[in-house]
Amino acid sequence: MLKNISVFVVGLIIGCACAALWMHHHSTAPTFDTAYQTVLLDTGQVYYAKIEGLGNPFLVLHDVYYVQSSTDPQTKEVKNVLIRRGKELHGPTETVLNSRHVVLVEPISPSSKVAELISQQQQSQSK
């Protein structure tokens, strides 16, 4: 009887492990209905971008923006500027991130200040 209970418990544990593994591999990645998403990394870096491959080991960011802060040494006033990636010396066309370092992904509301700034930059670049 004890042997039967042991076999049942081991079978139950294996069954639960298999079910958890199956659910992990068959879960669907979230989708967003906004043009841009916020991506927060475990380093504290924040990107605003169009994302591809959410739920995969690597996340690809397109049309990437980030905020650069500078402090006026005399007034101590902090100025934040939205910068589009690609202007750096190496001119990246996309950014590939290891998904293990992504803390969260959130949609950017089309009516938000970030969406407004992105739109303004795109309009000024197309002129």
Image (cartoon, rainbow, N blue to C red):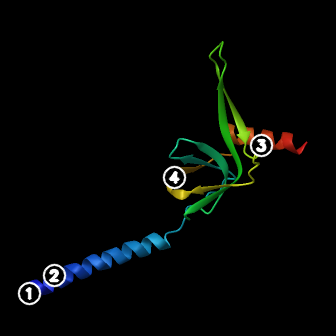
SS for callout 4: helix
CB-based contact (under 8 Å), mark 3 and mark 4:
no
Of the 4 image quadrants, the one containing the N terminus is: bottom left
Instruction: Determine crowd level at label 3: few under 14, some 14-19, many 20+ residues with C-alpha closer than 10 A.
Output: few
Q: Earlier in the sequence, mark 1 or mark 2?
A: 1
Tell me the CA gap for discs 3 and 2.
63 Å
Tell me the CA gap for discs 1 and 2.
9 Å
CB-based contact (under 8 Å), mark 2 and mark 4:
no
CB-based contact (under 8 Å), mark 4 and mark 1:
no
What numbered label is drawn on residue 1? 1
Residue type (three-letter) at the residue carrying disc 1: Met
Q: Which residue is mark 2?
A: 6
SS for callout 3: loop
Residue type (three-letter) at the residue carrying disc 2: Ser
Q: Would you say 80 lies left or right of 17 here? A: right
Query: Residue 71: x and y, percent?
Result: 64, 22
Residue under the image location 68 percent in, 37 percent down: 113
Q: Which residue is mark 3?
A: 87
Tell me the CA gap for discs 3 and 4.
24 Å
Q: Which residue is mark 4?
A: 101
SS for callout 1: loop
Tell me the CA gap for discs 2 and 4.
40 Å
Residue under the image location 55 percent in, 61 percent down: 30
